[in-house]
Image: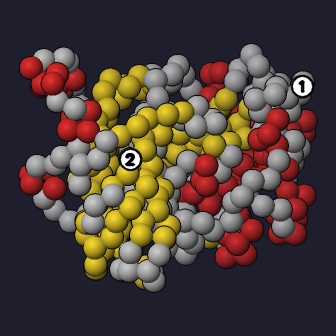
Amino acid sequence: MLLRISHETKLTYTSPVAETVFEVRMAPPTDEDQTNLGYRLRITPQAAVTSYRDGMGNRVDLFNVTKPYKELLILATSYVRTHRRTGPSRLDGLPRLGDGEVGIDAIELLAPSPLIDQSPALDAFVATLPRPAEAGSAIDFLTDLMNAVGERLKFEPKVTKVRTPVSEALELGAGVCQDISHLFIAACRGLGIPARYVSGYVNQPGEIATHAWSQVWAGDQVGWIDVDPTTRKFVLNDHVTIAVGRDYSDVPPNRGLWKGRAEETISVSVKVEPVDRVPLEWNEWSQPSSRSNMSQSQRMGGMSQSQRSGRPPYPHQRSFHAGLHQQQGEQQ
């Protein structure tokens, strides 16, 4: 499946702010499940972008805006072809999870993390779950676990926040895909199975923002298996991975600091749509040409009025005093 992804984040301020340090994780990787056919990041005000890999291997685009501004606009556009081999087909013949030694790359993912914390409510939930050895197969175990998580935590928008830990979501008994994925990961870790968080997108009508799901370690021969506990299904070709981490705190789509005295409003608009091909002009834009004398910041930055038309939905507001402040994040 070939998908076009447009992810627009707009930050507006009631008074000018400056000295912004900002990072985004919006570039889809190329791996055995998907191929990134093109990625553009455009920023207004213009800013030079530096890219690096974080500790989990995710691409991070970092930029600074030193001059005062009242609106920061970030538009990431990607073309991705997905070619995912389904989890059940990869697990076929594997009797159960949790057998064998855990590799050094996965052992850290057995421990609690900032948003997947220990609590009596979590311990009580894990105690009710069947053990992997009791399941008929790895497929049966993961299916039963997704159902158990879905019954314990109901999907309900706006009841949690971007930094809500799984212990608090359990008290509420509800949350969004971020919280449901956190609970699924916590259950896996409690049963001795490494699991990690996935930040990405999904081609599904009604989705208005980024999506989250989970990966479970199935041993060296199989690797990571993607499951979507929110929909209680194994992940298929309508999912596009952006980044992986211990939990959401490792892989927010955007994170930053700014200085000033203002109220901040964040608006996010995400569109994922199937397409037949990558436009020819996209490839031409990416190739060296007479534009080669243009700086990286000019190629990456700038935004035409037509690209900025329309106000993204669902704004959220937060007040600050003067000084250095943390930028709002996007809940998944």
- 154 versus 316 height, above or below: above
Tell me the number on the disc at residue 101.
1
> Which residue in the protein does label 2 denote?
63
Q: Which sits in the foreground, 71 or 119? A: 71
Q: Which mark sits nearer the N-terminus, 1 or 2?
A: 2
Q: Position of residue 73 (x, y in %)?
A: 27, 57
Q: Is residue 325 left or right of residue 311?
A: right
Residue under the point 43% across and 53% down: 22
State if disc 2 and disc 1 touch (CB < 8 Å). Answer: no
Q: Which sits in the foreground, 28 or 218? A: 28
| Quadrant of res 55 | top right
Callout 2, which amino acid?
Answer: Phe
Q: Mark 1: which secondary structure?
A: loop
Q: Position of residue 178 (x, y in %)?
A: 57, 57
Residue under the point 68% across and 46% down: 246
Q: Position of residue 211 (x, y in %)?
A: 48, 50
